[in-house]
Image (cartoon, rainbow, N blue to C red):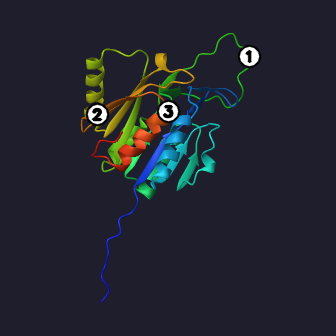
Amino acid sequence: MSKKTNKKHPIRVLVTAGPTRAYLDPVRFLSNYSTGELGFQLCRSLEKKGIEVAAVVGPTTQPFHELKLKRLVDVETADEMSEATLRLCRTLKPDFVIFTAAVLDFKPQKRERSKVSSSQKKWLVEFVPTPKIIDLVGLHHPNIRRIGFKLEWEPGKAKKLSAFARDLLIKKKLDAVCINFLSLIGKKKHPLWIFTKAGLQAKLNTKTQIAQALANLVNQPNEYWL
């Protein structure tokens, strides 16, 4: 009589990456600055640890298609990213979702069907909020562990930053939150602070360090991971 074995599946991670777009008319759109490089490096670092990786990626020149991903979905808008992320949460059942994407917070309420003429004296556009993808995943898939990103402008005092991170972790029920500041980001530096609900925290200075630290965190979520 053969002995049954319980084979545990590899860790599964879904990554969102890159910017999103919001179209004003067929040729004009709004976007936010994101190269998608951090998401790409993260996917590569996760793969090196034998983790099963899927990604939902906005418009970027990063070579995601060269990676051996379980699934890669290219999107443009925040709505498309939301739909693709929720769909992969249902079908792939990831253990973690890591939200590195820079998703627009607002979109035009109305998208013009034809190109708006440049001869117009004025063009008024009303904006409405886009879906909060990290919240929707938490609502519909509460068992999936989530790691969020928060971009601010200027860093405050360390105590205030820790309190801000703690509030985010509690409010959104996250496993970790990554906080960075636009005023500190340069071509060769990308300082970022990671806080986990287990009380671990670290400051990292490059995208490579960030990707490696997050891959370690996913691989050993309850241990010291740097």
Residue 89: which disc? none
Q: Amino acid at mark 2?
A: Leu
Q: Nearer the viewer, residue 25 or 154?
A: 154
The residue at which mark 1 appears reads as 118
Viewer-nearest of discs 2 and 1 = 2
> Does 56 appear above or below 124?
below
Residue 100 visible in the shown view: no
Q: Residue at x 50, y 21 (%)?
A: 185
Q: Position of residue 122 (x, y in %)?
A: 65, 11
The residue at which mark 3 appears reads as 207
Q: Secondary structure at mark 3?
A: helix
Report, in whole angstroms, how far the alpha carbon at label 1 lies from the one at label 3: 40 Å
For the N terminus, the quadrant is bottom left
Residue furthest to the top:
121
Q: Residue at x 32, y 86 (%)?
A: 2
The residue at which mark 2 appears reads as 169
**Which image quadrant is residue 166 in?**
top left
Q: Secondary structure at mark 2?
A: helix
**Between discs 1 and 3, the one toward the N terminus:** 1
Q: Amino acid at mark 1?
A: Ser
> Does 186 appear above or below 91?
above
